[in-house]
Amino acid sequence: MSTSAKSYAAQSATSPLAPFALERRTPTDTDVAIEILFCGVCHSDLHTARNEWQNTVFPVVPGHEIVGRVTAVGSKVTKFRQGDLVGVGCMVDSDRTCPSCQAGLEQYCVQFPILTYNSPDKHLGGMTYGGYSDSVVVDEAFVLRVPDNLDPAAAAPLLCAGITTYSPLRHWKVSKGQKVGIVGLGGLGHMGLKFAHALGAHTVLFTTSPNKAEDAKRLGADEVIISKDAEQMQKHANSFDFILDAVAADHDLNAYLSLLKVDGTMVLVGAPEKPLPVASFSLIMGRRSLAGSLIGGIAETQEMLDFCGEHNIVSDIETIDIQNINEAYERMLKSDVKYRFVIDMASLKK
Ligand code: NAP
Ligand code: ZN
């Protein structure tokens, strides 16, 4: 049993997103039905819509920064009620029994989590469809509470850009007294700046866009480095405790690794289409570490949302109608986003 929903989908790697009718399941006992109010536009949506990671099953409905209102709950749902403001991020299920899931690290589920879009849908068959839609049905275990004091549109990007930057900053214990770099001032990067600043670190933004320097300072950067300027980069050699790389395209990792102190760590959250070369000497000199991090678990995502509620942290957004999604993708490719597009889903009714 199911009900029909409106959405925007890409039918192939080269076709623009366009209106698409899909089915949402009738809520099970443990499901929450959600009217989607806002959905952020992540660069992963673009990578997937254009099959840049070569794993897209078409048609694909992207969107994993969902904020909405609960419209119905199953009989065994205990955490949510009709009318609650809720969020859904990148995952809608996992095996829930493997060591990762038991540890609250559903994103590292050994069976691989069921992602909000482009994952096999065990309920209806086919693939899961994401948040560029008017509704979604999700098991309550993967639904988050959105603090009421946050603007719902500006809170939407917390569900991916927020948790993806918060989780590594916490895991590697970024704190006061440390010098921390954030690479790339896009959707993820601007949240990384806000969190690193809120955690008390001396925060430095690396950008390829000199015109973003002023904004970066407003968003929490103590210093801004134009990464194309080798002289500026050299001045910071061997000085960083931690660097978070949120770049979506090809770039030189070695230039950043050489800025780490002895035992410093650089973490990749950006997922460019092509592999990035690493010189052994970039790591050997200084016993440096290069690591990666994928979103965050459900409990940690709730912790991040609550942290944002307490510190009044949301994303800096530009709200768009869904009819402008293809233009938004082109602007995202030009690093012309300040600093996250969020789709107002009321536009789907137009
Ligand atoms: P975004 O908003 O497009 O931001 C990416 C930023 O990278 C740009 O704003 C730009 O910042 C910088 N950049 C772009 N091209 C560059 C180039 N050629 N060289 C150097 N810097 C460049 O993207 P996003 O949504 O934040 O996502 C960033 C990446 O993270 C994507 O690959 C996405 O798929 C990935 N991601 C990973 C996870 C995870 O769990 N690990 C979760 C979500 C997203 P400046 O203008 O400041 O240089
Ligand atoms: Zn994302």
Image (spheres, rainbow, N blue to C red):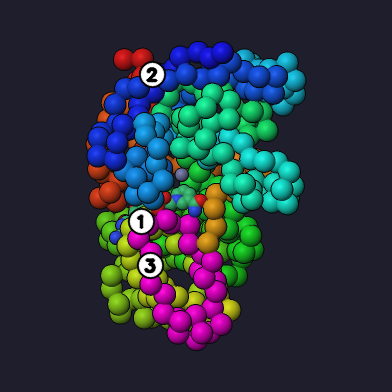
Mark 1 in CB contact with mark 3 (< 8 angstroms): no
Question: What's the residue type where badge 1 is placed?
Answer: Glu
- Quadrant of residue 201 in the image? bottom right
Magenta-span inclusion, residue 283: yes
For residue 273, the mark is 1
Position of 111 with respect to 214 (left or right) is right
Position of 255 with respect to 299 (left or right) is left
Question: What's the residue type where badge 2 is placed?
Answer: Ala
- Quadrant of residue 40 in the image? top left
The residue where tag 3 is placed is 276
Q: Please state, as top left, top right, bottom left or bottom right, where the N terminus lies in the image.
A: top right
Give percent across and percent down for residue 14: 24, 39
Cα–Cα gap, marks 1 and 3: 9 Å
Give percent across and percent down for residue 117: 47, 35
The residue where tag 2 is placed is 21
Q: Is residue 275 above or below residue 67?
A: below
Reading the chain from its start, which is encountered first: label 3 or label 2? 2
Residues rendered magenta in the picture:
265-291
